[in-house]
Image: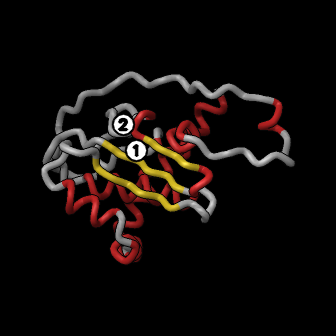
């Protein structure tokens, strides 16, 4: 975590309740469940912000309505909103989202991560970095950066277990 906060006093939003309705088919291992936006949102909502002890959902960085999934075309698009237009953590946040989805979704999916249009002063550059396979691979070879990503994702995993155990 950084000593000098980029956004020292972020707005914190209320968490939404999961709205997935469980069906008998979901418990049948012989039926393949399609991936949908709710499932993707559930995977990324509890990722920790790299700067604050808050989740991306609590900071309104990720929202269900900004996730688009086409299971038939193996496509996932996630748009996120940085807390401030000059957020220097935007690339790191996008990288955390990408890593979570790469680790969680079937390999058949093409994942596209983007800053929502008009929400960041360097959105074109950030989007280019987040969707360039070579740049992502190089970033993940950086031990310190990978440690930060894993820390953001590990906290999300712990939160998920806390919710599940209550």
Instruction: For label 1, count other residues whose C-alpha is less than 10 Å away and answer few (under 14), some (14-19) or many (20+).
Output: many
What is the x, y in percent for residue 14? 39, 22
58 with respect to 46 (left or right): left
Q: Residue at x 43, y 52 (%)?
A: 97
- Secondary structure of the residue carrying numbered label 2: loop
Proximity of marks 1 and 2: CB atoms separated by less than 8 Å = yes
Q: Residue at x 41, y 66 (%)?
A: 146
Vertical arrangement, residue 10 with respect to residue 76, above or below: above
Vertical arrangement, residue 23 with respect to residue 27, above or below: above
* Residue nearest the viewer, comparing 151 with 40: 40
Residue 54 is labelled as 2
* Residue nearest the viewer, comparing 4 with 119: 119
Q: Residue at x 44, y 42 (%)?
A: 67
| Tally of numbered tags | 2
Figure quadrant of the C terminus: top right
What is the x, y in percent for residue 25? 81, 36
What is the x, y in percent for residue 83? 23, 39
130 with respect to 151 (left or right): left
Q: Quadrant of residue 158?
A: top right
130 with respect to 121 (left or right): right
Write down the residue under mark 1. 48
Vertical arrangement, residue 113 with respect to residue 59, above or below: below
What is the x, y in percent for residue 76? 49, 52
Vertical arrangement, residue 17 with respect to residue 164, above or below: above
Compute the Cα span from label 1 to label 2: 6 Å
Q: Quadrant of residue 94?
A: bottom left
Residue 133 is labelled as none
* Residue nearest the viewer, comparing 116 with 99: 116
User: Counting residues from the N terminus, which is met first, the one under dot 1 or under dot 2?
Assistant: 1
Figure coloring = secondary structure
Q: Residue lying furthest front in this view?
A: 73
């Amino acid at each position: 975590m950084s000593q000098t906060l980029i956004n020292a006093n972020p707005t914190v939003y209320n968490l939404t309740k999961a709205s997935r309705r469980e069906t008998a088919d979901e418990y049948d291992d012989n039926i393949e469940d399609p991936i949908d936006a709710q499932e993707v949102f559930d995977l990324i909502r509890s990722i920790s912000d790299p700067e604050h002890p808050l989740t991306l959902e609590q900071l309104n960085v990720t929202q269900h309505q900004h996730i688009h999934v086409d299971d038939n075309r193996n496509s996932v698009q996630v748009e996120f909103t940085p807390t401030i237009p000059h957020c220097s953590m935007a690339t790191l946040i996008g990288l955390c989202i990408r890593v979570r989805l790469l680790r969680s979704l079937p390999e058949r999916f093409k994942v596209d991560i983007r800053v929502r249009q008009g929400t960041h002063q360097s959105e074109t550059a950030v989007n280019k970095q987040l969707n360039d396979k070579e740049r992502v691979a190089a970033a993940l070879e950086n031990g310190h950066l990978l440690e930060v990503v894993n820390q953001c994702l590990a906290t999300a995993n712990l939160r998920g277990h806390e919710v599940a155990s209550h």
